[in-house]
Amino acid sequence: MNFGYVLKRAWEIIWKFKVLWIFGILAGCGQAGSSGGSNSGYRFSAQDTYLGPQIQNFFNRLGPLGLGTLIVIGVLVILVLVVLAILFATVGRIGLIRGTVKAEQGAEHLTFSELWRDGLAYFWRVFGLNLLIGLIIFFAFVILFILGIILTVGTIGIFLVCLIPLLCLLVPVMWFVYIIIEQANIALVVENLSITDAIRRGWQVFIENIGNMIVMGLILTVGVGLIGGAIIGLPLLAVAAPAAAGIATGVTENIRDGLILSGVFFVIYLPFLLVFSGILRAYTATGWALTYLRLTAKPSAPMAETPLPPQPPEAPAPPEPPQTPEVPTEPNE
């Protein structure tokens, strides 16, 4: 496979159809939500010494009924955010695949509404596929965890020494699983398959083209994903610098001012972060979709094997006119 062509073509598609950037942003909603939750928890712990008495008095004034109502509202808000994150992430992933397919089919324009409709049409199958695979991985880890505890107790801790190489082996295994999941999602959308057929098709494409998949996986996940993500996230160090400096002093006022300043910087950088992350995710998803399309494309038949059109029968040649016999002439005397 021509990897250079795939990478170049992926960039041409996302640059021509910039609506794919929006679906790249939507596809990253799940990861953004998880990272945002960890940051908010850190800010609360940093301000705990300053806002602790005020928060404690507020909860004391609420009473049991008010506190229960607040907990229910908080749980409902979290559930709504989770549902929206799943919806946006799934529709975003489908929109990127459908946009790539339509671009390869010669589309000149892609609109948000048509890609959104395509995303809703495939939503439940793509959601079910990823939910099923996620549950399988979860229960596999639970079983391995239980077996690890049993073996550790049974071998008096010797199994823990053997666990280190097994954990190292788990990294490439999960990476291969990630590639298979990508191919299964693309197969479901491109070939309009069911969930089980899409999983089988993703596995088949991965096994039959394992060399190409490994090379493209290294390019898209390490070369593009990790390095590109590190470059995009580098300005966040400058954003967090005022908060870190304030916490380092240990003075309440400095901590408060540093957190406020970092919050302002983060709000300013947030639009750029979303756009750059959307472009990066759109490029990666388009690269995977193009890889699938090229590896599963049926080769055209050779020219020699192309049947020729039927030729009309040749008309019979007209009969030749009968020749008159020559009369011999007598010589003159």
Image: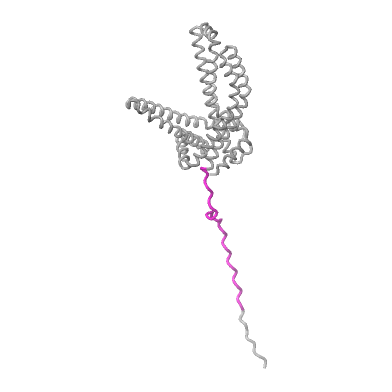
Q: Residue at x 60, y 16 (%)?
A: 258
Residue 145 spot, x, y in % from top left? 39, 26
Of 263 and 15, the residue lying toward us: 263
In the image, is residue 249 above or below residue 179? above
Q: Residue at x 52, y 47 (%)?
A: 299
Of 233 and 312, the residue lying toward us: 233
Q: Residue at x 48, y 42 (%)?
A: 211
In the image, is residue 59 above or below residue 304? above
Residue 77 spot, x, y in % from top left? 53, 18
The kind of secondary structure the magenta stretch mainly shows is: loop
Residue extending furthest right? 332
Residue 45 spot, x, y in % from top left? 52, 15
Span colored in magenta: 295-323
Residue 81 spot, x, y in % from top left? 53, 21
Q: How many marks?
A: 0
Q: Is residue 311 magenta?
A: yes
Taking the image as shown, residue 65 lies to the left or right of residue 107, namely left
